[in-house]
Structures are given as structure tokens and as C-alpha cells.
Amino acid sequence: MITQDGIKTLSRLIKDNILGSRAVVDGKYVESDIHKIETTKNSVKIYTYLDETVVGRITRHEIITKDGYVFLEKADNVTKTDERGLLTMFEITIKEG
């Protein structure tokens, strides 16, 4: 059984290797920072935020590692206006198999 210390270690490894995020907006990459990372009892939640200056059709969100690889990706199909920002959450559930 994975212990809470094991979950904390895996969470720290994930956090320490994330560089940032990007979204595909109107076919072009728009980079953004990670808004927040939360660790719960058995998951890591990564929140990205696109502010009001980003406008257009969003088709994908990605989490990028410090090595430049796509760690997580999520398809989307939303048209964003300049009226408000867009918060997106990725969740990694940690469980023993």
C-alpha cells in the first residue's frame, strides 16, 4: 500500500518537474504560467489560467515539463472572449495498482 509519505514524494516529483502550460488558441500556442498546484489525499491538481488578453478558439491545453515535453494534455473546444479569464484543471490520481 502506498503511504501518505509516498504520495507526498510523488506529488513533489510532479511539482518539481513542471515548467508551465500552454494552450492552442486559433491554431497557435499561447504560453501561460501554472496558476496553482494542490495536493490532496490521493491526487495532484494542476490549474492553468488564461487571462482576459487571450481571445479565440481554444482546442487544447498542455502541461509542459522542464525538459520541454508535454506531460499532460486535454482537448477542448471553447471560444474565449476578452470578458473573463479561463481556469483549467488537470488532475492526476495516485493509486496503487
Image: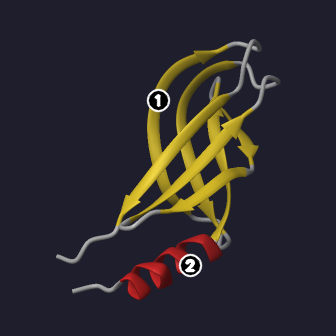
Q: Judging from the image, what secondary structure is the residue with disc 2 in?
A: helix
Q: CA distance from mark 1 to mark 2?
A: 28 Å
Q: Residue furthest left?
A: 97
Q: Is residue 84 left or right of residue 92?
A: right
Relative vertical location of residue 21 with respect to residue 11 in this rendering, above or below: above
Between residue 73 and residue 5, name the one nearer to us.
Answer: 5
Up/down of 71 relative to 9, above or below: above
Question: Who's the residue at 50% across and 74% down the image?
Answer: 11
Q: Which residue is mark 1?
A: 76
- Which label sits on residue 92? none
Q: Are marks 1 and 2 in contact (CB under 8 Å)?
A: no
Mark 1 vs 2, N-terminal side: 2
The location of residue 41, given as percent across then percent down, is 39, 67
Q: Quadrant of the N terminus?
A: bottom left
Residue 52 x, y percent position in the rendering: 79, 23
The C terminus: image quadrant: bottom left
Q: Is residue 34 left or right of residue 6?
A: right
* Residue carrying label 2: 12
Q: Amino acid at mark 2?
A: Arg
Q: Residue at x 38, y 82 (%)?
A: 4
Q: Which residue shows up at 64% across the image and 76% down it?
A: 16
In the displayed structure, would residue 45 be above or below residue 57?
below
* Amino acid carrying mark 1 in the image: Asp
Name the residue at 48% across, 80% down: 8
Nearest to the observer: residue 7 or residue 56: 7
Mark 1: which secondary structure? strand
Q: Viewer-nearest of labels 1 and 2? A: 2
**Mark 1 Cα-neighbour bin, 10 Å: few <14, some 14–19, many ≥20:** few
* 63 is higher (above) or lower (below) than 86: below
